[in-house]
Image: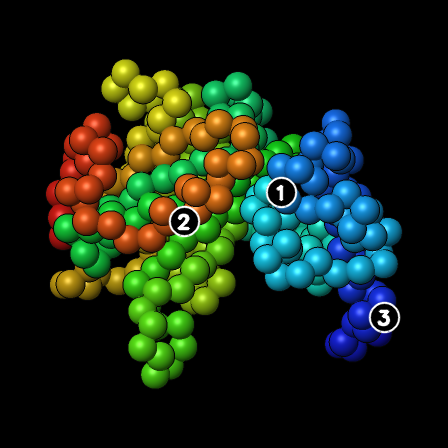
Amino acid sequence: MKKGASPNPAELRMILAENLQLLTSEVTSISDLCREIGVNRTQFNRYLGGAAFPRPDVLFRICSYFGVDANILLRRIDATVEPAAQLEFPLRGPLRPFDHYMLPDGMYRYWRKSFRQPERAYLGLAQITTKNGLKLWKGYDIHDQPNRAGSRRFSRSLGYTGTLIQHFDGFTLMSSTPYNDLMNITFFEYGLDSHPDYYSGISFVTRRRLAEANRLVSIVMQRLPKEPRHWINWARECGSHPITSVPAHIRAALQRVPDHI
C-alpha cells in the first residue's frame, strides 16, 4: 500500500487478522476466549483468517478483553513506533533495570486530583507493558471538555503514552498527550499505608502558573487483577467524580498536596 493511500477492505481484514493472531498467540484456549467475550468460535476463526470484520459491539468486546483500542483495525501492533522513540528524555548513563516484581505488567487504575477542580478527582485506566527492555505506559482518561468546538457534550476520552523509569524507592512516569504540547511527570512510591497493591505519588504538568489551576496534584494507582472480564466494568467507572466519593484511604492520600502550588 502506497504512503497516504487508503487501505482497501481486504488489507484492513488482513491487518486485523495479523493483530488478532498476535494477541491470541499466548491464549491457551480459543474456545474459552470466544465464550469469555461472547463470540461464535466459527466467526472468530473468520476474523483470524482475514475473511470477515467484527460488528462494532463485537470489536468493542475484543478490544476490552485484550486491553487495546480500535486501531487493531488500521495498524499492525508489531509495526508501531519503537518504544525508544515514543518519548525521549535527557538522562546520563544507562537506566536502572526495572524490578518487574514491584510493578508487574498488567492493568492498573488510578485516581488523580483534578488540576482545575480541587473538589473532584479523575479515575482512569492504564496498561503497563515491557517491550525491548523499556517499561511503557498506555493511559486512558476521560476529561470534562467539549468533544469538538460548539459541542454540548462535555466529556471526551483521551489516550496517552509514556515511559516509566525505575528508581530505588519508586518510579517516574514521563508522558505526553496527543492534543497539545504539555508533558506530565509523575512519581510513584511503592505502597500506600498498609495496601501493598497501591502506589502513591505526585503528578506535575508542564505549563505556566494559572490562578484557577494547579500544576502539582496527588495521585494514587492500584494494581488490578488479571481477569479481563472485570476490566470493562472498571472502564465504565472512568471519569470525573466528587472527591468525597473516593474511598477514604485514597481520598486521604489525594489531599496530601495543598491546592494552588
Helix, strand or loop for disc 2: helix
Q: Name the quadrant containing residue 212.
A: bottom left
Q: Which mark is residue 236?
A: 2
Crowding at mark 3 (Cα within 10 Å: few <14, some 14-19, many 20+): few
Question: Of helix, strand and loop, which one carries label 3?
Answer: loop
Residue linked to disc 1: 37
Query: Label 1 vs label 2: CA separation?
Result: 17 Å
Going from N to C along the chain, the mark reached first, 1 or 3, is: 3
Q: Which mark is residue 1?
A: 3
Nearest the eye: 178 or 225: 225
Coordinates of residue 180 in the picture (x, y in percent): 43, 67
| Amino acid type at mark 2 | Arg
Quick one: which residue is furthest to the bottom in this view?
Answer: 150
Above or below: residue 92 compared with residue 47: above
Circle nearer the viewer, 1 or 3: 1
Identify which amino acid the numbered label 3 is placed on. Met
Judging depth in this view, the residue of 159 and 179 nearest the camera is: 159
Where is residue 52 shown, x and y percent of the image?
Answer: 80, 60
Q: Earlier in the sequence, mark 2 or mark 3?
A: 3
Which residue is rendered at x = 62% and y = 42% of the image? Answer: 37
- Relative to 60, is 136 above or below? above
**Residue 137, disc:** none
Q: Is residue 159 left or right of residue 35?
A: left
User: Residue 166 location, x and y as percent?
Assistant: 48, 29
Nearer the viewer's eye, disc 1 or disc 2?
A: 1
Q: Is residue 47 left or right of residue 140?
A: right
Please say if the residues under marks 2 and 3 sit with CB atoms less than 8 Å apart.
Answer: no
User: 30 or 8, which is in the foreground?
Assistant: 30
- The Cα–Cα distance between marks 1 and 3, rounded to whole angstroms, is 32 Å
Which quadrant would residue 25 be assigned to in this image?
A: top right
Q: Which marked residue is nearer to the observer: mark 2 or mark 3?
A: 2
Assess whether mark 3 and mark 1 are in contact (beta carbons under 8 angstroms). Answer: no
